[in-house]
Image: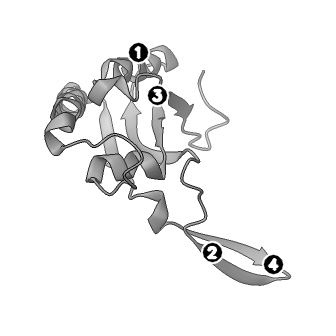
Amino acid sequence: MKYLILTYGTQRDYDLMTGAGDGAGPTLTPEDFAPMHQFMQEFTTELAESGELVDTKGLAAPVHTRRVQLQAGVPVVTEGPYAETQEVLAGYWLVEVASFDRATEIAARLAACPSPGGIWADAVADIRPIDEYSGGPEL
């Protein structure tokens, strides 16, 4: 069964990683993020080599988001709808594994991802079964 492992971030998180912060927070360099990038690369490579990885992508910063909604039957487009501190989807891993427990084990490994000064030590990951229209998820 396929599961989506979701990770989250804020515009501020993206700004920290690109050095585009407002100067109010810590100043971090690409070298500060090197252990995190190495962890993520190894994590993803291991999933690919085990045959469990279907796809993975990181998403662009929330500031590049457009939201479309109907108002009185007319589509209205809003750009960059997220406040700086609001948490949004930052990326995902789509895995195909034998059980929800195995998907949970994989997601739990993300807790070991290093971040500069432990700034994301309390980060979370969600695991959602993919409903493939076969009568519901196998939980």
Sequence-wise first label, 1 or 2: 2
- Residue 117 placement, left or right of 129: left
In this rendering, is residue 81 above or below 96?
Answer: below
Can the viewer see residue 73? Answer: yes
- Residue 16 placement, left or right of 24: left
Which of 3/80 is in front?
80
Report the Cα–Cα distance between label 4 and label 3. Answer: 35 Å
| Image disc number at residue 137 | none
Quadrant of residue 138 in the image?
top right
Q: Position of residue 101 (x, y in %)?
A: 48, 14
Residue designated by label 1: 105
Packing grade of label 4 (10 A; few <14, some 14-19, many >=20) is few
Sequence-wise first label, 3 or 1: 1
Q: Amino acid at mark 4?
A: Gln
Residue designated by label 3: 123
Can the viewer see residue 58? Answer: no
Residue designated by label 2: 78
Q: Are marks 4 and 2 in contact (CB under 8 Å)?
A: no
